[in-house]
Amino acid sequence: MSTWKLMSWKLTGSDQKSSAETTRLVHDVLLADDFELEDLLGFNAETAIKKMDKSEAALAPSSPSADAREWDGWKMEVDVDIEVPSHEKCTEGNGRTFTVHGLAYCPLVPVIRAAFTDTLSKWFHFTPFKRIWKSPVTGKEQRLYDELYTSDAWNKAHDDLQKQRREDGCTLERVIAGLMFWSDSTHLTQFGHATAWPVYLFFGNLSKYKRASPSSGICHPVALIPSDLTTQCSILAFEGLFPVKHDALIKTLLFHLSEWHALAKLQMHSDDSLARLDQALKKLAAEIRRFQQKTCDEFKTYELPNKAAARYRRQQTQTGPSGLAKSTSTARLISFNVHTYKFHALGDYSRSIRMFGTTDSYTTQTGELAHCMIKKFYRHTNKRDVTTALTKQERRRTLIRRQLGDHTSQELDAEVVSPDRFELLSELHHVMRALPCNTFNLANFLRENQSDPAVKNFLTKMKDHLLSRLHGYEYDGNEHSFTEEERNDLRIVSGLNRIIESTILRVNYTTYDIRREQDVMRPGPACFVMTLSWEDELNAHPYWYCQVIRAFHINVLHVGPNAHCRSIQTMEVLWVRWLGLVPRYKWGFSQARLPKVGFVPESDNNAFGFLDPSLVIHGCHLIPSFSDGRTDVLLRKGTSVVRNSTEEDDWCSFYVNIFADQDMYCRFAAIGVGHEIQYPMRRATSSIDDEGDSEEEDFTGETGDEQGDEDNTEGSGDDMSDEEDFRF
């Protein structure tokens, strides 16, 4: 009955009660040891909130001379005078004074004091340092740039502070409080005109990864000012849209734009990556000028119709009825202009990162995320006197958080790990949950699809794969072949009709900035993963790619004379379709082209196979080469278990999106600190700079004959009929 009443409460009334919040209500409140039901007799939420507000107001100092040490609350309806220069050159005191009425703010000193005494201050960094990384591969030492408190500016400010004369009698440690302010107007509702203009305070002493969660009490609203996934795919989307003489130039420009963008947004930089950023800017600048001179001058571009209409309306408003004849709604000719601040500021990124740390520490995204908190507060107000209501909501939340201290319902018991929490353990390489409800009848599946080339020799390949792993053979891309007698020594417990299928594959990996992340993938036609390459040739491609068709848990018993273990073992396997590099295609940073792959033809014995999930690095983003079209040569035309139900053929080829995120870019550029810790990084010997003025290294794939600089032939759909077009 208790469960029914609880669910009835959740499913009726307000629609803001989520399942997660209902569960939290039960575990954090109703089942708490100190929760007494008798204390709620006569309870009224509005009355309890008013008591909280009164207890907060009682802390406010009654006079300016009162002790404000404990008070970090809000001052309401304050008038602020701002002196604004009235001329380009204006001496101090000669500007015009404007008064901003009705400002709500928190005094900064009490906010700083409260933050440094808060439980979150245990995560504060009070002494700056410089992070030096020694490569385990080359032994080279270089400086890393990531957090504010590891930047040159913070280290210098800390040293300057220590040199200052101490206050008389003061023996306290002297540290820097890194104040970071964000301010932006936000709409509080999806519809209507309710707005707020908050000012947020974050502390740079806290790691930027913790600052990225404003809901955890890390964000401090300190003022309310009174009111008065296309870029990544653009390279392929533009392919073939322009005449041949412009097509290569535009693709090259888009590649260099993507590379500069990936480098500028890295959350951890090293001396090598900053040098690469400088080189990327040089190449980008050259390509932009080339684009302006060779492409823009040959096209006439006009402003969009809506822009022209808006300009026409502005002209009507400004000129009045007497000036209507001068207004025109004709679209203006628009030329490409590089003399703007955005282009000018590109050269400041590298220097700013060295001075202040990586850009994600001070990006506007942090302040934008904090808007979610203000909007959440607004939903709980009476929609009148918004500024006062928002300040009350903030104080209530702060009061509750301080009383809770370090207590949180998300703490993980190290001894008891539930299945849901088990999936989140980052020390595991991967997680494939084996749920009894996901029983898969493999025997029926093979019988129903026996005419599909994808399942040809399925059991033979699967047993060879399992036996290779049981014998401890190192995987090199080719499965070890076994005799039929050896295959019969491998018994599948419970038979083929009770295989457990896993519908979700979770792969944990170390990112370039030495953090643990997880890729969550669903096996199927759109699931592509990457593994390390086992090729030893010079300039060999560093990774292999495959499509994960299905994922299985198989209980096996090895009874052969050479069996290393004669007990039942559960083995995890991925059924995959391999892709290979497209030959006669040059890719790499010096070529400004993405890697290009395609499915291995069905006639190749290695077209389909099995993979140990522990070899998966993580998922990858493959973009179809739309200009190459589709083909039924790689796999016979018709429906197949490896295709979507509505498809009867495949894309001829795919581009590997090395700019899918910063981590993927760092893998191909071989500049990821965390990647060298997890995997040995393979480096090619060719320079990224065509002019030879860079010592950096680069992956450059050259598969096939040499081609012209601009004429990087990329096979069309008609050229895909040759089954040897894909190298694997």
Image (spheres, rainbow, N blue to C red):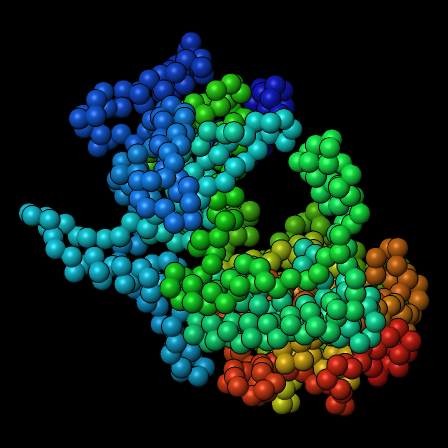
Which quadrant would residue 534 be assigned to in this image?
Answer: bottom right
Looking at this view, is 129 or 8 the one in front?
129
The residue sitting at 76% across, 36% down in the picture is 324
- Look at the image and tell me in which quarter the N terminus lies: top right
The residue sitting at 78% across, 69% down in the picture is 298
Which quadrant would residue 193 be assigned to in this image?
Answer: top right
- Look at the image and tell me in which quarter the C terminus lies: bottom right
Looking at this view, is 574 or 134 the one in front?
134
The residue sitting at 30% across, 40% down in the picture is 93
The residue sitting at 76% across, 90% down in the picture is 705
Q: Residue furthest top?
A: 42
Q: Left or right of 74: which side holds 259? A: right
Quick check: 634 above or below 400?
A: below
Q: Residue 632 in the image: x percent, y percent?
A: 91, 70
Q: How many marks?
A: 0
Q: Residue 80 in the image: x percent, y percent?
A: 35, 30
Q: Left or right of 266: which side holds 99? A: left
Looking at this view, is 555 or 576 the one in front?
576
Q: Residue 629 in the image: x percent, y percent?
A: 87, 68
Q: Left or right of 691: which side holds 221? A: left
Quick check: 35 above or below 238?
A: above
* Res. 259 visible in picture: yes
